[in-house]
Image (tube, helix red, strand yellow):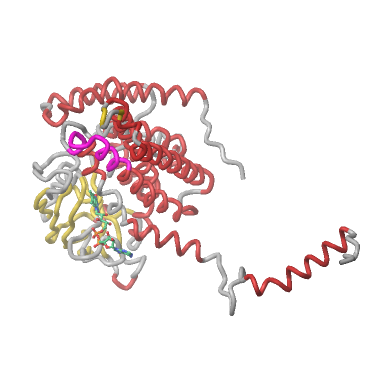
Amino acid sequence: MAWDFETDDEFAQQLVWMREFIDTQLIPLEPIYDRLPRDEWRVVEAHLQNQVKERGLWGVFLDPKLGGAGFGQLKLALMSEVIGRCMMSMGIFGVQAPDSGNMELLAHGATDEQKERWLWPNLRGEISSAFALTEPFFAGADPTAIGTTAVMDGDEWVINGHKWFITNASVADILLVFAETSPEGRPHRHASVFVVPTDTPGLDIVRDIATMAHPDVEFGRLGNHAELVFRDCRVPADHLIGQPGDGFVLAQQRLGGGRIHHAMRWLGQAQRSLDIMCERAVSRTSHGKVLGAHQMVQDYVALSHMEIQAARLLTFNTAWKVDKFGAAAVRADLGMIKAHVSKVVLAVLDRTIQVCGALGYSSDLPVESWYRNTRFGPIGDGPDELHKSVLARTLLKSYKPVDGWPSEHIPSRVPAAEAKWAELRDRAGVEESRT
Ligand SMILES: Cc1cc2nc3c(=O)[nH]c(=O)nc-3n(C[C@H](O)[C@H](O)[C@H](O)COP(=O)(O)OP(=O)(O)OC[C@H]3O[C@@H](n4cnc5c(N)ncnc54)[C@H](O)[C@@H]3O)c2cc1C
């Protein structure tokens, strides 16, 4: 089967424009981004977003057949790699998680009326959304076990439960809440997804959780992760997405593409980190030669480059497969790239810190904060162990058990080998050996 990762000239030009736009308009702001006045930033942000919209590059994660302006997963992978160079780019290009995944879910499951109310305003950037699945007292790795319930009462759903680590919930306008509606439907038909506006009575946004990315968390900032409690929180019947029991299938819709976007953004970050490592390696001297002349540092540079290149190809290949066969057909591949690339980026960041020494460990370089931010990778969107397990089970399905010796057992293969030898000798016309 032929693989083709080449893109047309017009799209290649778009990538060049993106790279230049990010390098000249966004990256220069990074050192002061956290202390920019929020109200002024919103005006500048809209100004930058308008330039992206004019280029036709806004919110392109959504497939045209779902009503979006997307170009398919392969092109999106190439874009995500450029976007990954700078964390603030996601919002400027309208592809930020969790909104992008939420919109994919709504595009698949919402009615036209629901799309008008929530999907299109979210896609235009007029409202923002969060996705509330994980709970403190049930393993997030196993969404078949959740404690949050939704019960029909008249023409309303009444939601009770406890969620946490809900990214952007403290700044979002709506939550997509995963709640159990029919326990008898376990494991995969028990839950449903509801849209809950964040000003709904009964929803308590308890706090934003301090994390290794933000140990001194300030409530209500983009990118925070909130703890939520639902106490008899009522939403109208038409806030259910899809049918009761569709939750699991809908939740899968938002995770597939998201894993490719994560993987490619991580690779963009890994490459920028490698650039920092290499610049240091050719600039600083130790024991009479530049760091890059020491073989162990060369190993860090070469290994990082090899891992990034291999991971890029793996991710492009998966994106290409999604475009060709659909996300459902390559579920194991999507988990594989997430589990693989999350390790590659952390390994490259770690080596960069090492090569930069104390400077690398300090906040004078961005790498330590990237490391802390990206450490969620092997945990979020389902832990990597789970994805590896799905991959292994998928691979194992195509193997059949054998009785006795393995089919590659050399002594057992000798009779067949001798028969094959006799056959080939006959066919080739080898004369009887005289010795
Ligand atoms: C930064 C960040 C943002 C997040 N944003 C959101 C969000 O917006 N919305 C949301 O709903 N959730 C969010 N989450 C939660 C995330 O999806 C969960 O953390 C993740 O699914 C793992 O669940 P858990 O934390 O409960 O870990 P657990 O399920 O308790 O698992 C803990 C560990 O046990 C091991 N383990 C678990 N199951 C298996 C298994 N089957 N096989 C082998 N090992 C296993 C793994 O090592 C795993 O890391 C976020 C998490 C982080 C860190």
Q: Quadrant of residue 78?
A: top left
In the image, 260 versus 101, the foreground residue is 260
Q: Position of residue 115 (x, y in %)?
A: 33, 43
In the image, 17 versus 355, the foreground residue is 355
- Vertical comparison of 191 with 283: above or below: below
Q: Which image quarter has ligand 1?
A: bottom left
- Residue 146 falls left or right of residue 263: left
The residue at the far bottom in this view is 404
In the image, 17 versus 407, the foreground residue is 407
Is 355 included in the stretch rendered in magenta? yes
Main secondary structure type of the part rendered in magenta: helix
Q: Quadrant of residue 147?
A: bottom left
Is 10 included in the stretch rendered in magenta? no
Give the quadrant of the C terminus. bottom right
Residue at image position (26%, 27%) is: 284
Question: What residue range appears in magenta?
Answer: 348-361
- Residue 9 falls left or right of residue 342: right
In the image, 182 versus 147, the foreground residue is 147
Number of marks: 0
Give the quadrant of the N terminus. top right
Residue at image position (24%, 42%) is: 371
Residue at image position (24%, 21%) is: 47
Q: Position of residue 321 (x, y in %)?
A: 51, 46
- Vertical comparison of 249 with 273: above or below: below
Note whether residue 167 is visible.
yes
- Vertical comparison of 224 with 423: above or below: above
